Image (tube, grey):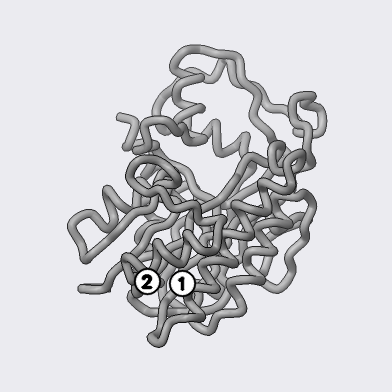
Amino acid sequence: MKNKKIAVLGANGLLGHELLNNRFGGKGDVVGHFGRGKENKADLSVLSETISYLDSIQPEIIINLVALTNVDYCETNPNESYLINVKVVENIVAWIKQQQHRIHLVHVSTDQVYDGEGLHSEDKPALTNYYGFSKYAAELAVATTTHAAILRTNFFGKSRAKLRASFTDWLYNALSNKQDIQVFDDVYFSPLSMSSLSAMIALVIDKEIVGIYNLGSRQGLSKADFAFEFADALDLNTDHMTRAKIENIDFVKTYRPKDMRLDVTKFEQALKVVLPTLQQEILKVSKEYL
């Protein structure tokens, strides 16, 4: 990674801020694309603008974080979901294929390409909503390149982005303010802290691995157990937090997978690492709120 030009696309999100401000801060030559604002005017859903932008910076490594992640919005706005989640990736891949030298693409996908009882292995996706479908379609585009790593993951931690709140930000604020909230005891996941995920992305770049990998914590928990363990780690009062079933919640309009726990064996073996348990990650992130 040293002395290599890195482009972080979608740098305005939670993970983008973590990568730029913490993991890659002051290391190498790193450029962040923040969307169509003042700093970066290129619309990556337009092929000509994508090519022009990437030509101008000539990255050797591309980390793609661009995504429309609102599940309900994706379900009711499939065209926009396609443009952001799929077309952007197709355009990045088209630019890569024009280059004479090798480009390492690291594409961050989602654990929502799985459903049914976990732990899920990489060869058994199950698509249950349009968001998951669009992310899987993007993976298929990435797979047409010869030097790309696809990371199916989920993450949490204290947000460094001013206008974006994380799952634990929401939990911390609600519990601190004694708001009545419900947490799902029938939805399971195995996310990593953003700091751990960033470290693993850096390792993926260093080792230049390719292929599809699940990247999460070991074993996982229900979202309800996660919330109560997070509250316990910070000694927050849980009198206003109750367990609920996602199927009984009216405001959830689109079907969500109920078990997204990841089998991370392939990643651990490829990178020769032992990933942390979710309990360890909760304790780690809780310190960010002290």
Mark 2–mark 1 Cα distance, whole angstroms, equals: 6 Å
Q: Amino acid at mark 2?
A: Ile
- N-term mark: 2 or 1: 2
Kind of element beneath mark 1: strand
Looking at the picture, tell me which residue is in the foreground, 185 or 92. Answer: 92
* Depicted 49 relative to depicted 67: above or below: below
x and y percent of residue 271 in the render?
43, 76
Identify the residue at image location x=27%, y=61%: 30
Q: Position of residue 174 (x, y in %)?
A: 50, 19
Task: Quickly name the residue at label 1.
Answer: 105
- In-front residue for pair 111/276: 111
Look at label 1 and name its amino acid.
Leu
Question: Residue 123 in the image: x percent, y percent?
Answer: 70, 73
Relative height, residue 167 to residue 144 (above, below): above
Query: Mark 2 touching mark 1, by CB under 8 A?
Result: yes
Image-quadrant location for residue 247 = top right
Q: Which quarter of the rendered picture does the N terminus lie within? A: bottom left
Left or right placement of residue 92 versus residue 71 in this view: left
What residue appears at the point 71 percent right and 58 percent down from the top-left corner? 114
